Image: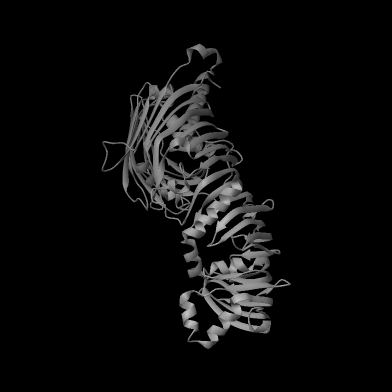
Amino acid sequence: MSRRNKFLIWLTSFLGLLGLAYASLPWVISALIKYNLSSRGGSDIQINVDYPGWQGLRLHALDFTLISGEYKSHVQVPKVNVTYHLTDLITGNIAQIRVPVVSVDIKSSLGSTATKSSSAELPMATLLSGQWLSQLPVNEVLLEQLTADMRIATEAVYSLRLSGELRDRQLQVNGDILIPKPAQRPIVFSINTQPSGEMRLLVSSIDQTATPMLTVTVKPFSQDEDQDQLKPDQINLNGTLTAQLDNLQPILMPYLSRTQWLPTFEGYLNSQWQAQVSGVDWQIMGEASVQNLSGRWREQMLPHSKWNAKFDVNSQRARLQTTLSTGQKAVVLETKAVHQFARGHGHANVTLKAVEFSDKGFVLSGLLKNWPYPFDINAGRVSASGRFRWQQAFNAQIDLKLDKLDGNYDQLAFAGLSAELALDNGEGLHTNKDAILSLDLVDVGFPVEKVEVGFALVAQAKTPIPIVRVKSFSAELLGGRALSGPFEFDFVRDKNSLIVQLEQIGLNDIMKLEQQEGLQGSGRLNGQIPLQISKAGIVVTQGQLSAVAPGGEIRYTPTPKVAAMAKSNASLDTMLKALSNFQYQVLDISSDYKLNGDLVLKVRLQGKNPDWQAGRPINLNLNLQENIPTLLRSLQLSDEVSEQVRKRYQNKQK
């Protein structure tokens, strides 16, 4: 074969291979783009690429799905124009990328088959640093319009519009976001990066663009003294963040819609941090504080407080340490938390340092400007600690200690309330061990002392409300004591029943409640009171009290008014003479208590008066009725009874 023919064959083969290579360029470019998107979590990738020309390339359509963390994004790019000079393309540089329109639909991917990433993604403030942008092989990028709808787990939708350009290594992005209900207002933002690597993010309300609600700045820095320890590709950044909480919180409220019990805050947040980035590894450390934090909870003003935090976050885990303290440090709450990104779990330890109450210092009602609750604490100590864990489920263990609390609930004054509770919400709220609640004194209109209740909280399967399982109850009252055996109190039930045993109740102590002048008695009573407790109130049916042998006496000296009435009423005169010195052997009381507060007593007395009718036997049957709430209110308002209660308790404390 001649040399000329060999050359023609070689040339034809070369041109054929070149044509084949050119014909396969769209497929190769598509494959490269698909590979890069797939390696970053992309799926369902559809792409249509034109044949490249001498000065440009047109991508007709790009459609793919990207799962990142808890969110699934569907991205649609109808058209991309790439402009290049052939000589620059050989060196890996592109003159311009122009994207007219991008549409992104973002939804929560919770419950999908998406797998968790092994590490957290790089924070946005770090990605926007100019040092990253300066490495892009593109001289100019123009994004004319991007629209995105982000649906969070609560179905609230954030609508985003932005445009931006990268030119001469300087990035400028402007846009706005429509915040969903309850705020439902637009905010505007701008991002600017300089060739030096400095980045600045401003977020403002659309009607207050002159006063940013959020400002983030990022600046690169070098550590010359530690150059030997730096990795070749390591980037160091300094950053600051300032935010107005009252303006920023409405942006986050749709995320918090499942926790409406959270208060709203006011104050100015300051944060300084440093970041180190090396490839996919990164770390951010810093501090944040709000020096004059105030808030509102259910229309109530919270006390002014200080909040300080230290954080250390990297691609594998996050650590947070915070301190919240009210004015004069009356209440101090400390938190230490760790979250592992790879496994999606973490834990936190929360400590409420001992809160000291004093009627001359801090009282519970001082927490809110207008205290709305019918109880208060003015002496004693409260402390608590909690351990919280989360992964697929949230578990909390809380230890609460009440130490000698004094205060009041409505008209009830109490003193010396103490208890230790070990609470756990695993498989329903319950106590990890039996608890004992003790109360030195409670004034219900008369003193009830040495109250002690042994109990446990037992979780229920179909309701978050636990059963209160009382194992023992005892109290001293009216010269004797009250006690009961084990019983359960279930808030879900229509009615709960228990029987209170009364032992050695003093008849004279009962008579004093009537505040009847000239009435005295002696003797002790035993019995039992069956109680039915419902949402409507308390009912007693056929309560029984009987005198302890050998009985006692009743003496009644009538007032002049009652004596005058007896002169014209023979039955009254006979009863008064019998009760002037009545020695009884039998005293039986049957009691019924109604929902309206009326107590009906049927009293049977057997005995004699040695000073009347030669001491012949006397049988008396009396029917008495009293409204107990009215009686107790009158006793609580009595200066004599309240002073007596206070003195008795003070004497016991000495």
Count every numbered label the image shows and give the total: 0
Left of 647 or right of it: where is 177? left
Farthest residue toward the right? 549
Residue 306 occupies which quadrant of the picture?
A: top left
Is 234 rendered above or below residue 588?
above
Left of 312 or right of it: where is 541? right
Which image quarter is the N terminus in? Answer: top right
Identify the image's colour scheme: rainbow, by chain, secondary structure or one colour.
one colour
Residue 452 occupies which quadrant of the picture?
A: bottom right
Viewer-closest of 610 and 540? 610
Viewer-closest of 128 and 535? 535
Is 473 rendered above or below residue 179?
below
Viewer-closest of 605 and 501? 605
Q: Where is residue 99? Give x, y as percent.
A: 35, 38
Q: Where is residue 21? Give x, y as percent.
A: 49, 32
Residue 97 occupies which quadrant of the picture?
A: top left
Please report the residue visible at 60 percent of the width from the left and 38 percent of the height from the top: 342
Residue 198 appears in the figure: yes
Q: Where is residue 104? Give x, y as percent.
A: 41, 46
Which image quarter is the C terminus in? Answer: top right
Left of 304 or right of it: where is 472? right
Viewer-closest of 276 and 270? 270
Left of 54 or right of it: where is 40? right
Is 472 rendered above or below residue 337?
below
Is 23 rendered above or below residue 182?
above
Residue 144 appears in the figure: no
Q: Where is residue 636? Give x, y as percent.
A: 49, 61
